[in-house]
Amino acid sequence: MAYKARLLMTEFVTHDVKRLVLTRPKGFRWTPGQGTLLAINKPGLKEEAHPFTPTGPAGADVVEFTIKQYPDRHGLTQKLHNLAPGAELLLADAFGDIAYKGRGTFIAGGAGITPFIALLRQMEQEGKLRGSSLIFSNKRWEDIILERELKSFLGERCTFTLTQEKRPGYERRPITEALLKEKVRDFSQYFYVCGPPQFIMDVNESLVKLGAKRKKLVFDEP
């Protein structure tokens, strides 16, 4: 782990997702969409590093993460949620294949939205949001991460689907080939896909069946 950072603040953005803001270590760089290994700099925890995606613009003076807690696993996400300001964390060099390639549709499942938060924020700063859209699937409405911000970026070009709750204004179904055929008009564009491994595999295969080119699918290999 090459870099040390201090936790400045935390706040909830949903019932089980927290925003963590860290000092930016000298020399730490990332491209929006990339991830890094993150660990707590304490005895017995230094080796418990897991990948997380910075969710702030690459030019920011701080490093921001948006992290979902999985309390049933009793793992690093729960420990990160319990940290107090001043805690020291360790970061590694950034890595990953998700990066802005051009206009496209972002397709996310649950916490898979996190690399796209950084990308969309950067695109908004650079005036590159026109023509792009988002399809975002969650179990329930309360699980949607940064819904208002995403809507402010993309407006009616946001589609939110819920798989375990019926709610006015939201699709009550998973992201399937049928939904993609209904919501996407141009399959020659780029498609940015992130979520659980099976989600990525299923969405990519559906997109290819509908005419998308594999070279225009942007995702991290599971």
Image (spheres, grey):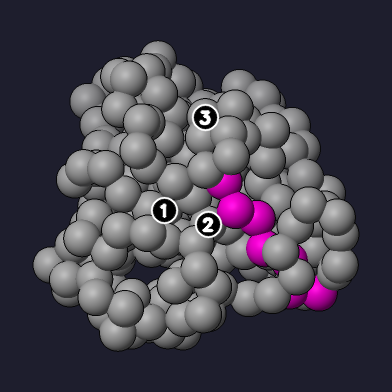
Q: Main secondary structure of the magenta part?
A: strand
For the record, the magenta segment spans 158-164
User: Residue 133: in sight, yes or no?
Assistant: yes
Q: Residue at x 31, y 49 (%)?
A: 104
Ranked by sequence position, the earlier of labels 2 and 3 is: 2
Give percent across and percent down for residue 83: 70, 40
Which residue is label 2 attached to?
A: 135
The three-letter code of the residue at mark 2 reads Ile
10 with respect to 181 (left or right): right
CA distance for labels 1 and 2: 6 Å
For residue 157, above or below residue 170: above
**190 and 142: which is toward the camera:** 190
175 within the magenta span: no
Residue topped by disc 1: 106
Q: Nearer the viewer, residue 198 or 176?
A: 176
Which kind of residue does numbered mark 1 sit on? Phe
**Rounded to the nearest whole Å, what is the CA distance between mark 2 and mark 3?**
13 Å
- The disc, 1 or 2, on the residue closer to the chain's N-terminal end is 1
Q: Position of residue 55 (x, y in %)?
A: 47, 37
Question: Percent from the top left, x then y, of residue 208?
Answer: 26, 79
Q: Are marks 1 and 2 in contact (CB under 8 Å)?
A: yes
Relative to 212, is 161 on the left or the right? right
Look at 69% across and 75% down and name the residue there: 173
Category of crowding for the residue at label 2, using alpha-carbon neighbours closer than 10 angstroms: few (below 14), some (14–19), many (at least 20): many
Residue type at tag 3? Phe
At horizontal 37% and vertical 42% (from top left) the residue drawn is 132
Q: Which residue is mark 3?
A: 153
Q: Badge 3, how many Cα within 10 Å: few under 14, some, many 20+?
A: some
Looking at this view, name the residue that lies furthest to the left: 215
Confirm whether residue 16 shows in the render: no
Query: Helix, strand or loop at disc 3?
Result: helix
Is residue 125 shown above or below 184?
above
